[in-house]
Image (tube, grey):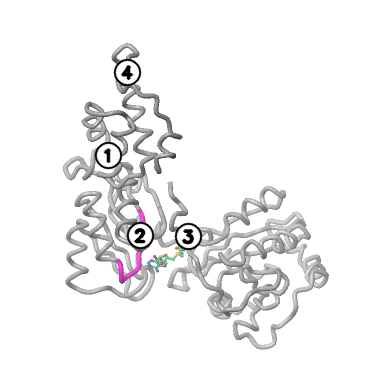
Amino acid sequence: MKGSHSGQRSKPRPDGRRREDGEAAIAAGNQSEAGQAGAAQPAHDDAMTADMTAKKAVHEPGTGAGCLGLVATPIGNLGDISMRALDWLRQADLIACEDSRVSGRLLRHFGIEKKLISYHDHNADEVRPVLLRHLAQGARIALISDAGTPLISDPGYKLVREAAAAGIKVTALPGPSAPLMALILSGLPTDRFLFTGFLPVKSAARRQVAAELATVPASLIFFETAPRLADSLADLAAVLGNRPAAVARELTKLYEEVRRGRLGDLSAHYRAAGQPRGEIVLVVGPPEAETAVAFDLDAALREALARMSVKDAAAQVAANSGMKRRQVYARALELAQGGAAAQGGAAQDGTADDGDGLEADGG
Ligand code: SAM
């Protein structure tokens, strides 16, 4: 649910310039841009293809065909890179990364000197066909993000989708990922969880997202920034109730910290202590019987349906709860139809509303 409403981070191009085409992107994305002396080479298709042919013998998993490897990199502690990840990066013909300066530093640390191509939210549509063409010609391309597992709140899924559709082998070199590490450290249930990326910046939008998630019987995982942490915790407490939660900060780094408590207490703590430093993942436990979800949709709808039409009941409950009208309407219809069936088919509502009527009404 909502994997991308805030999850796909939008970042400006690192060098502030616009790419004319994908080849230019490759040339400018190599390690000379990242400060690596002597690595500036234009990425001509022919030169690359020849280079790839020479390397085919050592490609793993190798059929001689191109292969896209999704390579996880550390989220702080460089010791977390895997041997397979290093092997893959060393054997890659090309490394697609978000910010060539960030990845250049990582690769230099491990003594890896490769052509880098920037692949981020702002150039993905023009660079993706270039990557696919190289893959089709037999290239082994590693996709990395600035940190952690690529595609998790980072660009990449369209490349995977299109590579797979083109019959290109796609594999992953698994490793660090902040949301999973936060979850397992949280002490909250791990049997079901829902990761929804970054919470919205504005309070009203955050509360709306929280209302949409209020009845999900799972631990919820969000990315959050330090300046917004206390306010977000307060908004979540207001809508979800005072559930248990955990704030996981600076994972794998020197000042790693996991603070566990109720949403309200955590909010009070960060308001009093001031904003913390570093990167943050927020985990919230599933609805509890005793804290009950702040808002019981079915109860509110039943009460409203007893007095008014499905359409009006949905509109009123949506306004009161902050939930999406379309979602509330769908549930109101289900309840009304269930009621009608129980009453031998008599329309409880007497109207023939449908989703279109609601749309026209601005829902
Ligand atoms: N792909 C990455 C992954 O798999 O972890 C996540 C990328 S997302 C764009 C970046 C966000 O992840 C940060 O804003 C922060 O919320 C979280 N994050 C990344 N590294 C972290 C760390 N070491 N400790 C806590 N949170 C971290």
Depth check, mark 3 against mark 2: the one in front is: 3
Residue 337 is situated, as x and y percent measured from the top left of the image, at 35, 22
Identify residue type, mark 3. Ser
Whether residues under marks 2 and 4 lie with C-beta atoms below 8 angstroms apart, the answer is no
Answer with mark 4 or mark 3, whichever residue precedes in sequence.
Answer: 3
Circle 4 is placed at which residue position? Answer: 340
Residue 288 magenta: no
Circle 1 is placed at which residue position? Answer: 317
- Please tell me whether mark 3 sits on a helix, a strand or a loop: loop
Circle 3 is placed at which residue position? Answer: 153
Real-space CA distance between mark 3 and mark 2, rounded to the nearest whole angstrom: 15 Å
Answer with mark 2 or mark 4, whichever residue precedes in sequence.
Answer: 2
Residue at x-position 43% and y-position 49%: 2
Q: How many marks?
A: 4
Residue at x-position 56% and y-position 64%: 121
Q: Please indicate, yes or no, whether residue 87 appears anywhere in the rendered image.
A: no
Residue 226 magenta: yes
Q: Nearer the viewer, residue 37 or 316?
A: 316
Identify residue type, mark 2. Ala
**Pointer 1: residues within 10 angstroms few (<14), some, or many (20+)?**
many
Whether residues under marks 4 and 3 lie with C-beta atoms below 8 angstroms apart, the answer is no
- Please tell me whether mark 4 sits on a helix, a strand or a loop: helix
Identify residue type, mark 4. Ala
Circle 2 is placed at which residue position? Answer: 182
Depth check, mark 1 against mark 3: the one in front is: 1
Residue bounds of the magenta highlight: 221-228
Residue 301, above or below 103 = above
Real-space CA distance between mark 4 and mark 3, rounded to the nearest whole angstrom: 44 Å
State whether label 3 is within 8 Å of ligand 1.
yes
